[in-house]
Amino acid sequence: MITYCFDKSLHERLTEYTDILTSPEKILPASQVMLEWVCDTEIVIEPVGWQALWNVPLSVCAENQVHYPLVVLVEVLQVDCSILSALVKVTWDELDRYLTFPTECKAKLIELYPTIKQTNTTLDIVGTAHCIDKLRFFYTYLWMPWDNEEDDNVDWVSQHLERRIKFAYDMRQGSIDKQTCDLIRSLVREGRQIWDKISNLEGQLTDDEDKTQTADTTFELMHLHFRLQQIKSEMDVLENPTMREMVLKHQSSIDKDTTNKNEITCYFVWLNGTLKGLQETCDKVQELLPNDLSIKIYGCLDEALHTCKTGDMIILGEGKHKIDGAGGLETGGTIRGIYDARHTILHPKDLNSASTLLDFSDSSTEVLLNNICINLGELPIGIIVRSGVVRIKHCIISNLSSKEKTVQTGIVVMPDGRLIMEDTLLEFLGTAVLICAHGEVVMNNCQIRSCYVGVQLSDHSSLTANKCVFDGCREYTIQMDTEKHVSDETKYLHYNELPNNISEITLNECHCVQSDFEDIVLKPKRIVSLAEWLDVDPKM
């Protein structure tokens, strides 16, 4: 299903938004920005009767217990311009598989992608698509959650519009380095999560509420507002090209000094236990490491990760290790458990600050994860492999709840990323492994158990699985989104029916157990890349 796609220049975007948001007689405070969009939408958009693809948000998939990411065909029954949303009827041909998913839903306009082919050809669908494209770009890249707290005497347009458009295009065109882009995405994501939480808490405050509960809620709101202002201050620096260059030069000099120290350091993390247990653990560590290796002892994995540098090694004792990212090992290094993987668990430290437990980027040095358990908790993604090689051996990747989470993805392999897994178990996830175009995955003697989809991939990606077991996949063992091998109709295959011309998939001595549907499905290519669905797009 082909949708409208617009590739606009910075100047075109700036002209469009200036025409919509500026008036010679008055300033436009942040509190009035949405009203201007409401007026523009009422004039341009078709109110009813057009078809679109709906990029279903994670929250809706979770609420209705369906696999995420999900894109479905819908018909617009009514547009509500006052809240920039629409009532849509789902015309998805696979809806009968999901009895919990309603046939009519409320969708934000920015989640809809009008299709070129329409049943009613008299509609101005091009104008509607243009309107939604402008709205989507604005609220995705230009509007920040802290803008809601700006004073009414500040003109939002003169203060932010041109600078933020240039900032967005600098990121999309690669003018800002990868590390800074990752930081920016993380700050914006955290800011949006905080604002959603603030809105929910403020909606819960009532006059009849218990005084103790009200005090707790008020204190939490104060903390959230304070953190939101901290994020705003950081983003103000990063949006300013001069300030950003100064910060990056300073960081570069620090990184250069650190890089000059080539020796590898081992960090041994011991949480707690008896003296006898510590002695036994130290004996095991001694067996693993050469005698002349420099070693430091920490009581917290998160501290060790933010102290270490590329290429270092971290050895973990038993326990639940809470972390908020890969720290210094983001660009290469080793994390290794010395006991059973189920007893050496990496767990998210703060569910509000990130969507991923481990994010590996630009790994010129190989990453090795060995004998540990990656617990997603409530995070949507466990591991992202952005580039370079990541090896995972004798590990478990799970949410440890013994229940499938339809919206969780174990590992995402981005373009130019390479993942090699050996003797690893992935369980209780929505999608075990997701491979973007030009990403590569090799799986040896691995098991995918009780997931909705085993492996999801697209054209120009690569999956090689040797002696792997796919056990109890609720939907498909392998799902491929393609425009090379199917046109408009979905094609279902059993394992032994895989055509030789599908070079992206190689299966050797693998077998499937208790799959509810066909083993392999080939689906028409979606509207946007897999990475963009999951908010891990390197462009922004």
Image (tube, rainbow, N blue to C red):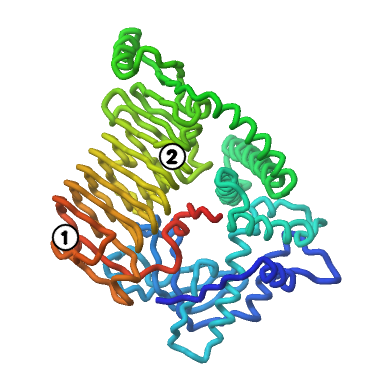
Q: Could one spot residue 302 in this view of the protein?
A: yes
Q: Residue at x 19, y 54 (%)?
A: 507
The residue carrying pointer 2 sits among few (fewer than 14), some (14 to 19) or many (20 or more) residues within 10 Å by Cα, namely many
Q: Quadrant of the C terminus?
A: bottom right
* Viewer-closest of 150 and 287: 287
The relative height of residue 370 versus residue 104 in the rendered view (above or below) is above
Q: Are marks 1 and 2 in contact (CB under 8 Å)?
A: no
Q: Could one spot residue 200 in this view of the protein?
A: no
Dot 1 or dot 2, earlier in sequence: 2
Q: Quadrant of the N terminus?
A: bottom left
Q: Residue at x 45, y 40 (%)?
A: 363
Disc 1 residue type (three-letter): Tyr
Q: Position of residue 96 (x, y in %)?
A: 27, 70
**Distance of mark 1 from mark 2, alpha carbons?**
32 Å
Q: Position of residue 419 (x, y in %)?
A: 34, 45
* Viewer-closest of 323 and 501: 501
Query: Horizontal placement of 510 versus 387: left or right?
Result: left
Helix, strand or loop at mark 2: strand
The relative height of residue 96 versus residue 327 in the rendered view (above or below) is below
Query: Horizontal placement of 53 versus 92: left or right?
Result: right
Query: Horizontal placement of 246 versus 336: left or right?
Result: right
Q: Residue at x 50, y 26 (%)?
A: 308
Q: Which residue is mark 2?
A: 358
Q: Which residue is mark 1?
A: 495
Q: Position of residue 112 (x, y in %)?
A: 49, 70
Total number of numbered labels?
2
Helix, strand or loop at mark 1: helix
Disc 2 residue type (three-letter): Leu
Q: Position of residue 192 (x, y in %)?
A: 58, 50
